[in-house]
Image: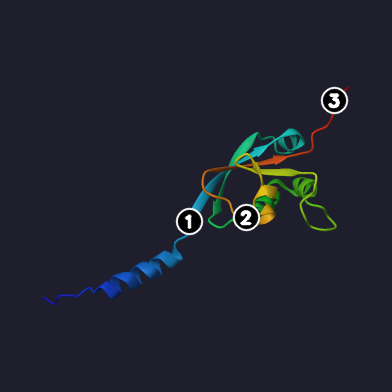
């Protein structure tokens, strides 16, 4: 019976090849408030995203999932950018204190979209 010799180089090569094919996913809790809650009929949902996903990526994924009305609410049709009056929080911190729309999401985080608050009577 022939013996097969396994070297450290073989092991490392196999690990590198197999790890380049592995994709890690993260679970993100999306929370909706006010008019977005009404549009989606959801208080929250869990979104599974790839490692390295940014806030802007999540907004585009959600727009694809929830349709044109959602997209129009989030994104300015002329610029294609998220509307400036919306607040985006990641784990209760404004993304403006991080890397803005380029902020990369971490696993088991909470992402909230906060529409503008309408004033009451004085």
The image quadrant that residue 77 belongs to is: bottom right
- The answer to whether mark 2 and mark 3 are in CB contact below 8 A is no
Disc on the earlier residue, 1 or 2: 1
Label 3 neighbourhood size at 10 Å, few (<14), some (14-19), many (20+)? Answer: few
Q: Name the element at disc 2.
A: loop
The image quadrant that residue 91 belongs to is: top right
The image quadrant that residue 120 belongs to is: top right
In the rendered structure, the answer to whether residue 84 lies left or right of residue 109 reads: right
Which residue is at a point 52% across and 50% down the rendered structure image? 26
Direction left: furthest residue = 1
Direction bottom: furthest residue = 2
Direction front: furthest residue = 97
Distance from disc 1 to disc 2, alpha carbons, whole Å, reads 15 Å
Q: Which mark is residue 54?
A: 2
Q: Which mark is residue 120?
A: 3
Q: Is residue 2 above or below residue 41?
A: below
Which residue is at a point 68% across and 54% down the rendered structure image? 101
Direction top: furthest residue = 122
Foreground mark, 1 or 2, reads 2
Q: Which mark is residue 60?
A: none
In the rendered structure, the answer to whether residue 93 lies left or right of residue 5 reads: right
Q: Which mark is residue 24?
A: 1
Distance from disc 2 to disc 3, alpha carbons, whole Å, reads 35 Å
Foreground mark, 3 or 1, reads 3
Image quadrant in which the N terminus is located:
bottom left
Residue 5: x, y in percent? Answer: 19, 75
């Amino acid at each position: 019976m022939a013996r097969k010799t396994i070297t450290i180089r073989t092991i490392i090569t196999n690990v590198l090849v197999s790890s380049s094919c592995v994709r890690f996913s993260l679970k993100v809790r999306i929370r909706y408030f006010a008019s977005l809650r009404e549009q989606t009929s959801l208080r929250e949902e869990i979104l599974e995203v790839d490692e390295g996903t940014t806030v802007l990526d999540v907004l585009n994924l959600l727009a694809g999932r929830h349709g044109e009305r959602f997209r129009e609410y989030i994104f300015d049709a002329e610029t294609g950018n998220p509307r400036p009056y919306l607040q985006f929080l990641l784990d209760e911190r404004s993304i403006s204190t991080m890397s803005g729309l380029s902020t990369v999401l971490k696993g088991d985080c909470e992402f909230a979209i906060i529409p503008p608050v309408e004033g009451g009577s004085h």
